[in-house]
Image (tube, grey):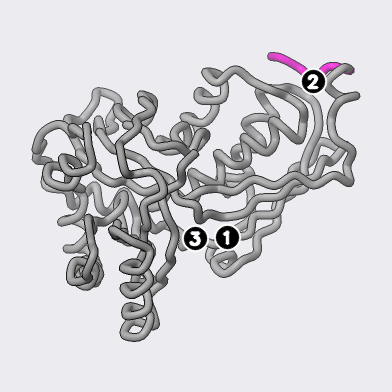
Amino acid sequence: MPHVDAEVAAACPAGGEELVETAFAKINLALHVRRKRPDGYHALESLFVFTELGDRLTGRVRSDGAIRLAIDGPFGASLDAGPDNLVAKAARALQAWLGEGFGADLRLTKMLPVASGIGGGSADAAAALRLLTRLWNAPMAAETLAQIALALGSDVPACIGSITQMVRGRGECLQPLAIKGLAGMPLLLVNPGIAISTAQIFSRWDQVDRGPLVATDLDQLIADGRNDLEMAAMQACPVIADVLSALKAFEGLRLARMSGSGATCFALFETDRHRAAAAATLRAHHGEWWVAETRIRTA
C-alpha cells in the first residue's frame, strides 16, 4: 500500500488553507435499463450531463489523520454527518489507499435535495475525492481514482469529471460525448419534495429490455431516448406524473423527463426566457416543489 512520503508531506497545504469543490448535479437525459448482469447489477446505458448547480464542499488539512465532516445548507438537515455519509466514506477510502497521512476538516453545504435522482451523494463523494487529492497533494492516475470511485457507488466515477458522457455497464464504462447544441442549454430542475429509494424503484421496474440507447444528436435523444424507471417511479409516487405533465405544457420546451430513479424531473428549454417563465409559473402554483434554474455545464 502506498504511503504519503516526506516530500508529499512537505508540499501539503498548511492547515489554515481552505480548498473548495462543487459537487455538480447529475442529470440522466436518458436511462435505458438492459439485461441483469451475473453480479446482480443491471447493465445500464445512460447519457449523463451535469448542471452548473451543485453542493459545495470545503476542506482544510488536519495533521492528526482524523476525518471530520460538518453539514449545513438548505437540505443539510436531511443528512447524517456520520461515518456512513458518502463524503466521509470517500475520504476514508482515499486515505486508506494512500496509507498513513493527513486528515481533513470537511464541510458540505447541501444545496440539492437528498435521494432525488440527480446524483447528490455520488457527486459529493466525487467532489471529496477531487478536493482531497489536491488538499493532500496526492495526484493520482485517472484509472486509480476511478477504481476508488466505483467502490463507493455506480455513479461516482462519472461524477469525477462531471462532463457529458455515455455511461454503460454498472457505471464503469465511460465515453465522453459531445452533442451539438447541448452544452449551455437552459435547464429547469423540479423536485416535488419526495425522497425515493433507488432499490424500491428497481423492484417495481417491469424487467422489460426495450433496447439500446443511441444518442448521436439531440433530436434523436429526444425522439428515441427514454427513462425506463419513469413508470415505476410514477406508480410509487404519482406526483412525479404531475410534475412531468406540468413541464410538458410549457412553451419553448425541448425535452422533459425524470432523472435517474426520481423524483427530480428536468426540462430543457430553447431559451432562458422560456425557462424563466416556466420557473415563475411553477413557483406560483406549486410552492411546495423545489424549482431550480440552471444550465448544462460546458466543461
The residue at the point 15 percent across, 56 percent down is: 231
Crowd band around label 2 with a 10 angstrom C-alpha radius: few (<14), some (14–19), many (20+) = some
The spot of residue 106 in percent (x, y) is 72, 49
The residue at the point 65 percent across, 60 percent down is: 71
Eyeballing the image, is 166 above or below 254? above
What is the quadrant of residue 213 in the picture?
top left
Q: Please check the rendered image and state whether residue 5 is part of the magenta-colored stretch, yes or no.
A: yes
Q: Are marks 3 and 1 in contact (CB under 8 Å)?
A: yes
Using the image as rendered, state which of residue 183 and residue 8 is in the foreground.
Answer: 183
Q: How many marks?
A: 3
Pointer 3 residue: 112
Who comes first in sequence, dot 2 or dot 1? Answer: 2
Residue at the limit of the structure toward the bottom, as seen here: 284
Report the disc number at residue 4: 2
- Over which residues does the magenta segment extend? 1-6
Pointer 1 residue: 110
Q: Are marks 3 and 2 in contact (CB under 8 Å)?
A: no
Could you tell me the amino acid type at mark 1? Answer: Lys
Could you tell me the amino acid type at mark 2? Answer: Val
Eyeballing the image, is 8 above or below 200? above
